[in-house]
Image (cartoon, rainbow, N blue to C red):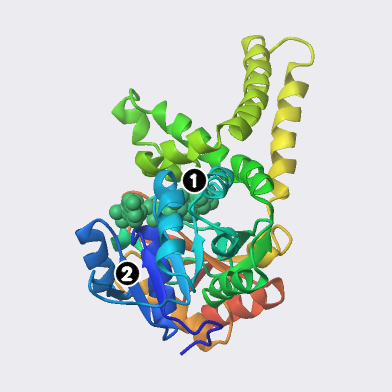
């Protein structure tokens, strides 16, 4: 069983995708996890998948840590109640926005300095375009950034407990003030969500024969357009000012692009397009790799697999048996074909060895 830095018990309030994933990950580490959600279905499914045990109303608990996994709109209220109900516990939330929740807690006159000292606002930079506990994954947080937004009154002990949980779940901890966090995620999370939704909304009236041609370009840019609108209207409205600044910049770029494409043979038009694409290349190259490694730090090996059950696990077990760590994995299916392409990312020093091992085992490696 993996080591843990926590003692438990831990209470997760709000057992949807994120809450149940946290419960699952901590339970897998042998910690005692309790679950609570106003939706009886959400807490039962979370319990059924192994995220912990449902806390009944007559049970008394003295948790070391309370994790609030509720939607942003109600997070401050649930955190405040948990601080009052569990006077010895650290209480953290994982909502995607931080300033509005902190402001509501600081303004809550039921909470004294000692209570506020036990609150830590946090945000794991991991999720899925699905919601609810059925989509939960214990390993969701492996190698992802987890931001700690302590405030002026947060006690060092509570910050340490919150960080211990993130570390236990395999995340990389970083620290930021709430405002700096909200401005950062407006750019790297909330704007991409809006852009993806806007691209996908162009497809509403697309003819079937055009959609039939959809490849990975469209799939890559629209995966998160399937995200839950109920959650995102809360996130976007709580972080509106930071997002509006970015959208103004995007509007300027779009205006420039439209102007250029309206007269593509005008002098300088192609240079303008090249500049726009080049700026995109440069921005993309700045996205860090896994573990905060420099971009493109991993080497890619592409393997052809038959489209039948057990192929991926057979491939992964062959790679594991060779003692090579898989840093990332992507699968591509070609419509109508009986094969798929699996992109395996490994550290560059082991790429050739992986190709040799897989080729010897008669896997078809695309060179
Ligand atoms: N989905 C993501 O990708 C992602 C990633 C990082 C952080 N977050 C944040 O995590 C939180 C949960 O998101 P999710 O994706 O798990 O949503 P979800 O819809 O899957 O789960 C939310 C759960 O909260 C419960 N809930 C509703 N009102 C509640 C209340 N008053 N008290 C307690 N529980 C309540 C719901 O019944 C539901 O089970 C949100 O604040 C979100 O901003 C989401
Ligand atoms: O990968 C996804 O599907 C996500 O929605 C993840 C994502 C992100 O933008 O990276 C979305 C919102 C959360 O607040 C944190 C993470």
Return the residue at label 1. 220
Q: Is residue 137 visible?
A: no
Residue 184, how many percent across, how many down? Answer: 66, 45
**Is 19 situated left or right of 179 in this image?**
left
Residue placed most toward the observer, 13 or 320: 13
Looking at the picture, how far across and down is residue 188, in whole percent?
Answer: 61, 45
> Under tag 2, what secondary structure?
strand
Asked whether disc 1 touches disc 2, contact meaning CB atoms under 8 Å apart, the reply is: no
Please, is residue 26 above or below residue 111 in the view?
A: below
For the image, the number of numbered tags is 2
Residue at the image point whose x is 51% and y is 81% from the top: 319
Q: Name the spot of residue 181 as percent of width and height, x first.
A: 64, 49
Towards the viewer: 113 or 306:
113
Which residue lies under the disc numbered 2?
A: 35
Disc 1 under 8 Å from ligand 2? The reply is: no
Is the CB–ligand 1 distance for label 2 below 8 Å?
Answer: no
* Tag 1 secondary structure: helix
For the point 35% across and 33% down, the residue is 211
Q: Which mark is residue 138?
A: none
- Image quadrant where residue 12 sits: bottom left
């Amino acid at each position: 069983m993996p080591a843990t830095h926590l003692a438990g018990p831990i209470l997760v309030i709000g057992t949807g995708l994120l809450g149940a994933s946290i419960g699952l990950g901590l339970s897998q580490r042998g910690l005692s996890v309790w679950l609570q959600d106003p939706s009886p279905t959400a807490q039962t499914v979370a319990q059924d998948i192994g995220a912990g045990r449902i806390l009944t109303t007559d049970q008394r608990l003295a948790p070391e840590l309370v994790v609030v996994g509720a939607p942003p709109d109600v997070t401050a209220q649930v955190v405040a109640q948990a601080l009052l109900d569990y006077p010895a516990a650290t209480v953290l939330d994982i909502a995607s926005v931080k300033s509005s929740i902190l402001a509501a807690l600081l303004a809550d006159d039921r909470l004294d300095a000692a209570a506020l000292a036990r609150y830590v606002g946090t945000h794991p930079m991991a999720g899925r375009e699905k919601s609810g506990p059925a989509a939960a994954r214990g390993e969701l947080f492996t190698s992802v950034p987890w931001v700690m937004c302590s405030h002026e009154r947060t006690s060092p002990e509570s910050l340490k407990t919150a960080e211990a949980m993130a570390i236990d779940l395999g995340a990389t901890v970083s620290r930021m003030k709430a405002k700096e966090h909200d401005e950062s995620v407006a750019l790297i999370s909330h704007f991409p969500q809006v852009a993806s939704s806007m691209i996908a909304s162009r497809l509403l009236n697309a003819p079937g024969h055009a959609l039939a041609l959809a490849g990975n370009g469209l799939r890559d840019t629209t995966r998160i357009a399937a995200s839950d609108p109920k959650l995102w209207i809360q996130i976007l409205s709580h972080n509106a000012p930071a997002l509006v600044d970015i959208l103004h910049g995007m509007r300027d770029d779009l205006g420039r692009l439209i102007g250029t494409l309206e007269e593509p043979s005008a002098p300088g038009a192609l240079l303008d397009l090249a500049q726009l694409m080049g700026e995109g290349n440069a921005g993309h190259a700045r996205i860090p790799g896994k573990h905060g490694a420099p971009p493109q730090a991993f080497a890619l090996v592409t393997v052809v697999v038959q489209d039948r059950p057990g192929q991926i696990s057979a491939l992964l077990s062959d790679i594991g048996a060779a003692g090579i760590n898989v840093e990332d994995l992507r699968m591509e299916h070609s419509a109508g074909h009986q094969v798929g392409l699996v992109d395996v990312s490994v550290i560059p020093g082991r790429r050739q060895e992986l190709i040799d091992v897989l080729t010897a085992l008669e896997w078809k490696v695309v060179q």
